[in-house]
Image (cartoon, helix red, strand yellow):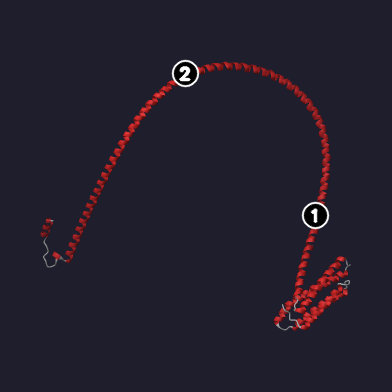
Amino acid sequence: MTAQWSRVELIRLVTVLQDCEDQLAVLGHIMPDRLKEHLEADRVVSVDKILKQHSGAVKSPVAVQQYQVEGAELAEATQELRAQGELSSKLETKPLSPDILTYAELDRHFVAQVITTLRKELQETGMFHSLLQALTQERKRKAHIRDFIAREEEGRHRIKALQKQLMDIRKTKLVELQRRDEMTAHLKDQLQMMKARRTLEKKYVTSSSELQVYQGQKLNSQQEKQLEDVIKELREKIEEESHVHTELVKFLKEDQISLEETLEMWMECYERDTENKQQELSTLKTNRANNLARLQELAKKYRESEQVVIEDRLEKENLRRQREKEETEWASAVKLQSWWRGTMVRRGLGPYKKGKKPKTKESKKGKKKKK
């Protein structure tokens, strides 16, 4: 952007900025003075007046439109400078703590640096881009600070909520601890009762065990007597089983001898029958070979007879076709002769020409007889 500044206007702007820069330099060496802050604000107002006068001097529509855009940006910059001055004035009304003085010094240094850079740029190029860039960076920094403050406030609220939650948990735990102390006292009472009960139960179990031992001994003696009777009975059964076993072995040996004799007899029969069957098998194989040879000979004769029959059928079929062909040719020739005779009669050709006497019926009959 190129502003339509005249030389005089530029000098006026630079002079105002130089004055502001000197005032800020003085403020850097002495304590903040309310009057000097008002003077700085007046310098900013004088910049606005110069801009308004310059806008009245511009007459070209394009230049007016361009100047309006640049004037809006510059007016916004002056508003930022005025806000810095008002903030410093507000700080003057409060007690000056070290933190407030540090903050005011930082703002003074920032404004002085911006004004110095703007003055140099106006002297060299007649532009104020550095002012817009400084304001943009300052807005970003303030936005970052506001975000940080918001996060810090959110963290404080969260800490308060957690502290409140911690107090609630502590109260709950105290109530729980008191309830557990009461439960511990109750359990101790129950433990004393259980110890007394356990003593009584121990006495009862001891007497009951002695009684059960006596009863068990009596029952064991009775069971021993019963088992001795069972052993005696089992011995008698074992002797009886031994006698039965001896008799059974004797019987089985005799039966084995009989079975061996029967087996020898059946082996002889098996060998004899096997030999006979082998002979019959040889005879059947010989007959099978003879029958197979005869079957092959008969098959050969059948194939030859079949070939003769096929040839005879083919010959008869050829004769039949030849005869049908001759009959068809004969019928075609008769039809052709009849058509030709009719044509000759209708057109009067050959012997049927006009002027000749027509043949009598008797002559026609004679020709038919000759045929």
Image location of residue 301, percent across then percent down: 28, 40
Residue that label 1 marks: 162
Q: Is residue 96 left or right of residue 259?
A: right
Image quarter (top left, top right, bottom left or bottom right) of the N terminus: bottom right
Specify the label residue 297 is tagged with.
none
- Residue at 82% over, 33% down: 195
Q: Earlier in the sequence, mark 2 or mark 1?
A: 1
**Residue 123 in view (yes/no):** yes
Residue that label 2 marks: 258
State the residue in front, 294 or 305: 294
The kind of residue on which mark 2 rests is Ser
Q: Quadrant of residue 341?
A: bottom left
Image location of residue 99, percent across then percent down: 86, 65
Q: What is the crowding at mark 2: few (fewer than 14 residues within 10 Å), some, or many (at least 20)?
A: few
Q: CA distance from mark 2 to mark 1?
A: 109 Å
- Residue at 76% over, 79% down: 124
- Residue at 82% over, 30% down: 199
Q: Quadrant of residue 190?
A: top right
**Residue 82 in view (yes/no):** no
Image quarter (top left, top right, bottom left or bottom right) of the C terminus: bottom left
- Residue at 66% over, 17% down: 229
Image location of residue 118, percent across then percent down: 78, 76
Image location of residue 153, percent across then percent down: 80, 61
The kind of residue on which mark 1 rests is Leu
